[in-house]
Image (tube, grey):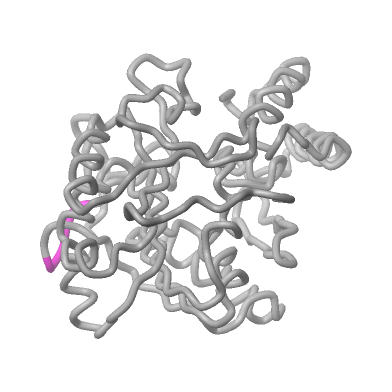
Amino acid sequence: MSQWQRLPLIRQFSEWRWAQQHLYPGGRAPWGALIQRTIAWYWLRWSGQLAQPKIIRIQYRPAIELLFPSLKQEYPLFVYHTPLYEAEFFLLPSLVKPDMIALNIGAHVGIYTLALAQLLPRGHIYAFEPAAETYQQLQINILWNQMRQLVASNITTYRLALGDTDGEALLFQGSSPMQASLLSTAPAQPYEQVPVVRLDSWLATYRIDRVDFIIIDVEGAEDIVLQHGTNLLQHHQPIILCELNRKFGRQTAIWHLLSQFGYRFWRYNPRRNRIEPISNPHDPSIYIHQTHQTGRGYGNVIAAPAMWTPPHLVGIH
């Protein structure tokens, strides 16, 4: 999509059309709210207020509030109320049950974590975010929502990367905090040193004997995380909402790893508002974001055990 801070107003119409087709279930875009929030975004941009702290209130179950020191990187969340144009955010209520135990690996500032906290009132969410500054923002958002009584105390956070060792690792910085990764994509890339642990080690240390659902978005290192959680994959087989990102070229490794444990793969089709099976990691229907850039494109897949039946989607909002 476009560079948000420089998006010409005339191009907003094509952006809305794209969102209607790829983001909103059945193409039911909330046009009034979109127009209102877009006007507000341009006013903040033109008046020089994007760099000021703001709260984004997202109507969810019933609502979550996200505090940001700056809105410069938060155009999709501000206008469309979904992280980086991810339609799966709207799908989440159909994938989980109220008593599930969930892991949010790569929690960033807590968008999915807070949504899960509302959807799992009898469950628990363990959220992992290794970057020091981002982790601080995650904690602020959780405390704020708990203080506002929007979520319960069913969240535990860890300033940890999940990886292939127990100790420390380098977390390479991208053009935004959401692009931090254990994988380097450029020479002399800036980094910070972060604590890291293998998933199986963490489960054993904290005696977590059940996991039902995982959201994982760790910028290309998903297979590194999951291959050190084989006990979990073999014995618990949680449903996994996993990003595949062609920029890192590891989508085949992620696919093959999960296939070894009997997982099958699905994608959410917002236009038809249904979950559809996919048969290979190169299916172009997965990579609906940034496809205008050569060798790029990313999207989410639902990896589920063979006996899983996708829910019938009625009335998703």
In this view, the residue in front, 301 or 152, is: 301
Evaluate whether residue 73 shows in this view. no
Evaluate whether residue 173 shows in this view. yes
Magenta-tinted stretch: 166-170
Say which residue appears at 88% left-offset and 38% top-offset.
32
Taking the magenta stretch, the answer to whether it contains residue 306 is: no
Say which residue appears at 18% left-offset and 50% top-offset.
224
- In the rendered image, residue 271, in percent from the top left (x then y), is placed at 65, 30
- In the rendered image, residue 295, in percent from the top left (x then y), is placed at 33, 18
- In the rendered image, residue 275, in percent from the top left (x then y), is placed at 53, 41
Quarter where residue 205 is shown: bottom left
Image-based side of 144 in relation to 88, left or right: right
Q: Name the dominant secondary structure of the magenta segment.
A: strand
Taking the magenta stretch, the answer to whether it contains residue 169 is: yes
In this view, the residue in front, 125 or 171, is: 125
For residue 166, above or below residue 18? below
Image-based side of 269 in relation to 215, left or right: right
Say which residue appears at 55% left-offset and 53% top-offset.
311
Image-based side of 55 in relation to 277, left or right: right
For residue 116, above or below residue 208? above
- In the rendered image, residue 229, in percent from the top left (x then y), is placed at 19, 63
